Amino acid sequence: MRQVILDTETTGLNPATGDRIIEIGCVEMVGRRLTDRTFHYYVNPERDIDAGAFAVHGLSREFLSDKPVFGNIVEQLIEFVDGAEVVIHNAAFDLGFLDNEFALLKRPAFRNLASKITDTLLEARQMFPGKRNSLDALCERFSITNQHRTLHGALLDAQLLAEVYVAMTRGQEDLSIDLIDYTVGADSSGHIKPLPTELKFIAASDEDCLLHEKVLAEIAKSSKKDPVWSPLAQTD
């Protein structure tokens, strides 16, 4: 599965009032692993930058004055994104700007290029209701270093989001069987030594069983449903 993690920076907050994209950054993942392919451009918006936006990303009109306009990079963007699942943090914001840029060029909406749009902000709100779910907050929550992020930058933010996305969707990958060292207990030739034949079997006492049932009952009470390993939760 090919995924493109995408982020933009803009002149302001609303494309409907003339705000434009000034930076776009994308990284590619295949099979949940980053490849060496990236897409990154600064874009000349041919207009001023709002003071509030400048405070966030630090990109000035002077800096962007010699950069390509969006129409000069659109074909490369289409080639990079086409057919991939696109992962964005707060997708409604970026898609609004991207669709607007495509509309100004009289092209079909950008979102039509993607096989699927995944919004990590919406997913984070479901996973962590009532918590802060900005990219910085998620980096902190998943112990992803972002100390070098003093200002927002599209490519850097896309790279950080890729790490956040993998952490958010990891599931049981942490329980990797590859962590087992199969050489422990092997002889000099690398063959595993046979297990001892005189193994002791120790059955749980009645008291142990009662304590175990008590723990299960407490778990069921706190979670308001029976644990999956409880006989009460099993069906024929």
Image (cartoon, grey):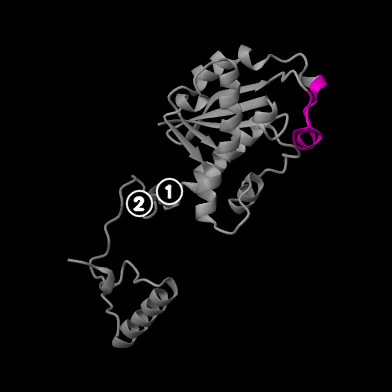
Please tell me whether residue 119 is drawn above or below residue 228 in the rendered image: above
* Residue bearing mark 2: 186
Q: Residues within 10 Å of mark 1 (few under 14, many from 20)?
A: few
Which mark, by number, is residue 44? none
Depth order, front residue of 62/97: 97
Residue at x 51%, y 18% (from the top left corner)? 78
State the SS at label 1. helix
Q: Quadrant of the C terminus?
A: bottom left
Type of amino acid under label 2: Ala
Depth order, front residue of 33/88: 88
In the picture provided, is 81 more to the left or to the right than 149? left
Q: Quadrant of the N terminus?
A: top left
Q: Position of residue 222 (x, y in %)?
A: 44, 74
* Residue bearing mark 1: 173
Q: Can residue 89 be seen?
A: no
Q: Start and end of the magenta stretch?
A: 48-62
Residue 58 covered by magenta stretch? yes
State the SS at label 2. loop
